[in-house]
């Protein structure tokens, strides 16, 4: 898996810290962190992997209080801004539902989850 992570500090130098194993993913994480520009937030960008496979590891980090999404969809981040700074209120992840899943859809979804190692 190729990844980059960027973290926005909320005190001290208030810098964006970055790391990862792929320069393109690191740059993308920084670009997104700069766009959000809210303290104590982080962005992880990845390819050649599935976000859902990392969720439990991220949630196990004691400093992680909340997780807004793990998706390949376009995301809009809802920001609040005050004299003190900026904070994330939530995200809009994907589109509205277009119908109700049928049996073919269930079979496809279950097959995908098994293929990516999320379900057995």
Image (spheres, grey):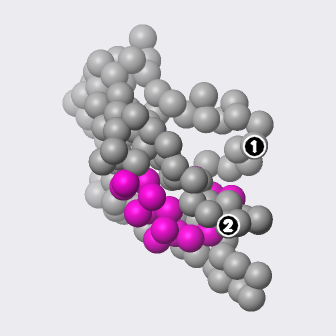
Which span is picked out in magenta? 27-42
x, y percent for residue 33: 50, 62
Residue beneath disc 1: 63
What number is the disc on residue 95?
none
* Element class at badge 2: loop
Residue beneath disc 2: 14
State how far apart marks 1 and 2 are (Cα). 17 Å
Report the predominant secondary structure element of the magenta stretch: helix
- Is 78 on the left-hand or right-hand side of 97? right
Number of marks in the rendered image: 2
Is mark 1 in CB contact (under 8 Å) with mark 2? no
Single out the mark in the foreground, 1 or 2: 2
In this rendering, the answer to whether 24 lies above or below 50 is below
* Residue at 69% over, 30% down: 60
x, y percent for residue 115: 29, 18
In this rendering, the answer to whether 23 lies above or below 81 is above
Residue 21 appears in the rendering: yes
> Tag 2: Cα neighbours inside 10 Å, few (<14), some, or many (≥20)?
few
Say whether residue 28 is magenta: yes
Front residue of 118/77: it is: 77
């Amino acid at each position: 898996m190729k990844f980059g992570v960027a973290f926005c500090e909320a005190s001290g130098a208030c810098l964006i810290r970055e790391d990862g194993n792929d320069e393109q993913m690191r740059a993308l994480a920084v670009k997104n962190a700069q766009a959000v520009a809210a303290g104590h937030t982080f962005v992880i960008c990845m390819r050649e992997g599935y976000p859902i496979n990392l969720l439990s590891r991220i949630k196990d980090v004691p400093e992680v209080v909340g997780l807004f999404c793990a998706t390949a969809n376009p995301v809009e981040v809802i920001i609040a801004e005050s004299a003190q700074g900026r904070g994330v209120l939530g995200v809009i992840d994907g589109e509205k539902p277009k119908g109700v899943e049928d049996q073919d859809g269930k079979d496809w979804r279950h097959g995908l989850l098994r293929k990516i190692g999320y379900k057995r």
